[in-house]
Image (cartoon, rainbow, N blue to C red):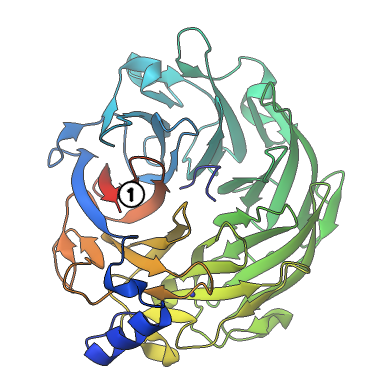
Amino acid sequence: MKRFSFSAGALLTTELATAVVAAAAFGGIASSFPNGQLQFLECIGTSGCAQAAHVMDGPTGLSIGGDQGEVFIASTASNSVDILTRDRKHGTLSQKDGAHGCVSETGDGGQCGDVRALLGPTDLINTENFLYVASPGSNAVDLITKDKDDKTWGQSGNPEGCVSEGGTDGCDTGYALTGASSVELNANQSKLFVGGTNAIAWFERNRSSGKLKETGCISPTGTEGPGCVAGFVPGTVTDLSASSDKKSLYAVVPGSPGAVLEFSVFRGALTEIGCINDDGSNGCVDSPTPLVNPTGLQLAENPRFLYVAANGSDTLAAFARDTKTGLLTPVAPPTGCYNPGGTGGCTAALGLTGINQVRVCENGYCVLVSATDGVASFFRNPKNGVLSQPNDGVFVPCFNLTGTGGCTAAAGLGGAMGIDSIGGGTKQAYIAGSTTDSVSEFHLR
């Protein structure tokens, strides 16, 4: 779903006037639109892909390695993490055998490395030679490390190889980890946050060994363990995004309406400062943009804008962030939200039906969104956060399995979920297809 170093104007409509307005809003650069354009390469996984992948069932979370040489996949149905080797020149993926290519709860008959507390992994994040995985089926967060000598991935046989609720599966004893579903590192990689069912737990991280030490949590009661405080966490936290200035953390809780939660961060501990939802219930701010069932979010790197994927509204919503207080302000329609029909006063956009996750490109000039069986891309103005799908006859706004709805056909995108991108010399984006058991590979311009 994410790589540590990564972290709204007008959108495309069918009317030429909208394209003209967008070009004016971007000060003349809209005619070339060099950023955000995707070009499909191939996929890895199912028989319809260029290469097969083993033990990749129900992939959801995806994270590009910090050295850009690997892509990690949390495969929920196979209780595994797939480790794909990335060709740094061309961006294509392959999979090695054994513990070089995957780890799983059972080792899958020697196909993978054998680790514990890895039931139903949904999200992961990596830094250096350490990988942290949220496993709701084990109520745990796993630490998987790369051996410095043989380069295989594995887990310490000591309890420190994982932290679980109550210390099950031979892990270190943790708390507020029931339904652990999302993970996030702070900007200097010294803290790890884990979102679970009605709670967010936080840990101090040893940057040399990767070992975790739990120091607190936030939950409705605040009684789970030392350092816990009471706060509004109305369900399972499915995505987290930390600010690059280390001052804030944001979380989404799906539901009808669900909520976007706002926290200030001081010495790694959270204090809840607000929440936003679709109807103003539970004391939250009532969003002027459709915000039912939010499932994913990410801050831009600057970090003055936050983007939220609202699955129940098929809406990509934008929020302005106060860099002093951390509080969010919904950006008013039409430039504050984008959905297929332009409902709720939003701007019409393609490829957002069943929106799941959102990622801001490393250079800040584009936003990528996974949705149902596809991926949508947007040009982004980094100065004001405004998004656009250029109507220039060249820009491809979206890809999906069938090539319908104004999108272009591409393989491997069934049940598109986890998404990540890489900048630098050769730019790529990767999307996990949870129902096609595959990962789709794109060039990113």
User: Which residue shows up at 62% across the image and 51% down it?
Assistant: 196
Question: Which is more toward the observer, 247 or 232?
Answer: 247
Q: Quadrant of residue 248?
A: bottom right
Q: How many marks?
A: 1
Query: Residue 417: in sight, yes or no?
Result: yes
| Residue placed most toward the observer, 244 or 70 | 244
Q: Residue at x 55, y 77 (%)?
A: 257
- Foreground pick, 16 / 276: 16
Residue 255 at x, y = what percent?
53, 71
Which residue corresponds to the image point at 16% horizontal and 63% vertical from the top-left?
Answer: 408
Depicted 365 relative to depicted 92: above or below: below
Quadrant, the C terminus? bottom left
- Horizontal side of 153 relative to 369 (left or right) equals right
**Residue 83 picture location, percent across and down:** 38, 29
Single out the residue that lies furthest toward the top: 149
User: Looking at this view, is 410 or 280 the one in front?
Assistant: 410
Q: Quadrant of residue 304?
A: bottom right
How far from the left and from the top, in percent, is residue 363? 46, 54
* Residue 9 in view of the camera: no
Where does residue 103 sit, x and y in percent of width and height? 43, 24
- Identify the residue shown where x is 70% and y is 55%: 199
Rendered position, 180 above or below 24: above
Amino acid on which the number 1 mark rests in the picture: Ile
When asked about the image quadrant of residue 406, the answer is: bottom left
Residue 424 as seen in the image, left or right of residue 166: left
* Horizontal relation, residue 316 to residue 194: left or right: left
Q: Which residue is mark 1?
A: 431
The answer to whether residue 129 is above or below residue 435 is above
